[in-house]
Structures are given as structure tokens and as C-alpha cells.
Image (cartoon, helix red, strand yellow):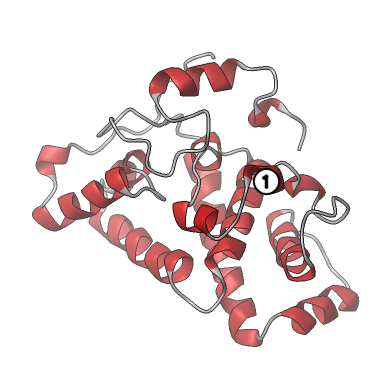
Amino acid sequence: MTERPQRISYFPLDQMDDRMLVEMERCATVGTPRPESSAIRAHSQAAFWFFADSWKSLFHEGVVEHSLKELCRLYVSRSVKCEYCGNQRSVKAQGDGLTEGKLDELMNFETSGTFDVRQRAALSYAEAITWRLDPDDAFWDRLHANFSEEELVELACFITLTMGQQSWLRLLNIDHHQLMAGTDASMAPGFEDADALRASKDDARYWATQPS
């Protein structure tokens, strides 16, 4: 694994106010997001709280099932190749039955047979947004058959939020276990600590080195 220079520093914990530190502790112990990306956003309090509040509302709350949004989040990770985001997992989604075997089939979601009708429709939505496709009427008929307009708006706002953040974070060369290290909260299997992360990234089968 080749080390690359970090492009924006972590904002010092000792310069954060009490409310920010509570959120940072939540990131370290619960994850999604983990503390490194939050410490980057902490350079701007407006950015820090915009993301924290929006992420809570769109990812952890809302009317669309959390595991479906986690599928879309990871589809974006694999599409834009944000390793920092792609090596995290939602514990809540895992508890809802989202397995690593399903995630292995994300980029072939239409043909893999792994996903149900609603999951494939949601992933097609993420695909169209991420890859800037120009879908036809059949695409929209499919979405309206599987989702209410409230759900379509929530899902799109979540996909665009995570796509924007991941497209930015992948440029910064940040990684896990660099700040407030010591927990494996929301880490993917094989990335639980710094040594495991390094070994997984050096493996020839590492997901980010494979063609999209």
C-alpha cells in the first residue's frame, strides 16, 4: 500500500467546543461517519453541523429503509472509488440482514439475482445519478412502481449528499485509525484496525483496485 500525502489536516480536538466533541465521540464509538472525515469538516463549523445534521436526518432517519440507503451509499463508494467511505459499514444495516455477499454483487446488481425488485430499482436510481445517465420513461415507471414520491425525494437527496461527500473525500487521502483510534465501530470486515486495514489494501483482491 503506497502512502499518499494528506491534503487537508484534521482539525485539532483540543480546539473543538463541547458539542463538537460529543459528536466526535459518537463518530469514534458508533461510526458512519467515523472521526477522520468529521475532523476534516470541523475546519468549518457550518460544514461540520450541516453534514452531521443532514446525515442523521437522511441516513439514520426518514421513510426509506436504512439498509436500502446503505446499499446506495456503498454503490456510490464503488463507483467513485472513495476508499475511506467504502471500507465502512452501517451496523444497523448489518443487523437488518445486509451481508458482505450482497455487497460483492453491487456493480452487477441488475443481473446478479442477489437483490429484490425494490433494491434493484433503488440501485438503478443511484446508478443514474452517479453516472449522469439519461434514463427513459421505463426507468421512471419502474421507480414510481416501487417508491412513493416522498421516498424518491428522500432517496435522491441521500444519494446526492453521499456522492458529493465521497467524491470530495477520496481526493484527501485520509484513512481510518488515524484519529481517536482504538475502536472498530462500523468498519468493514478486514479493516478493523490499522494492521488489518493495511493487509486488506495490499491484497490483490482489494475492491478499489478492481474495475468498476
For label 1, the SS is helix
* Residue 11 vs residue 23, the one in the foreground: 23
| Number of numbered discs overlaid on the protein picture | 1
Instruction: Please tell me which residue is depicted at 45% across the width and 33% down the height of the picture.
Output: 172
Answer above or below: position of 153 versus 174: below
Q: Which residue is mark 1?
A: 103
Answer above or below: position of 194 versus 54: above
Identify the amino acid type marked 1. Leu
* Residue 80 vs residue 22, the one in the foreground: 22
* Picture coordinates of residue 56, whole percent (x, y): 38, 65
* Picture coordinates of residue 51, whole percent (x, y): 37, 59
List the single residue furthest toward the bottom.
Answer: 149
Instruction: Please tell me which residue is depicted at 26% across the width and 46% down the height of the picture.
Output: 43
* Residue 167 vs residue 79, the one in the foreground: 79
Instruction: Please tell me which residue is depicted at 74% across the width and 53% down the height of the picture.
Output: 131
Name the quarter where the N terminus is drawn. Answer: top right
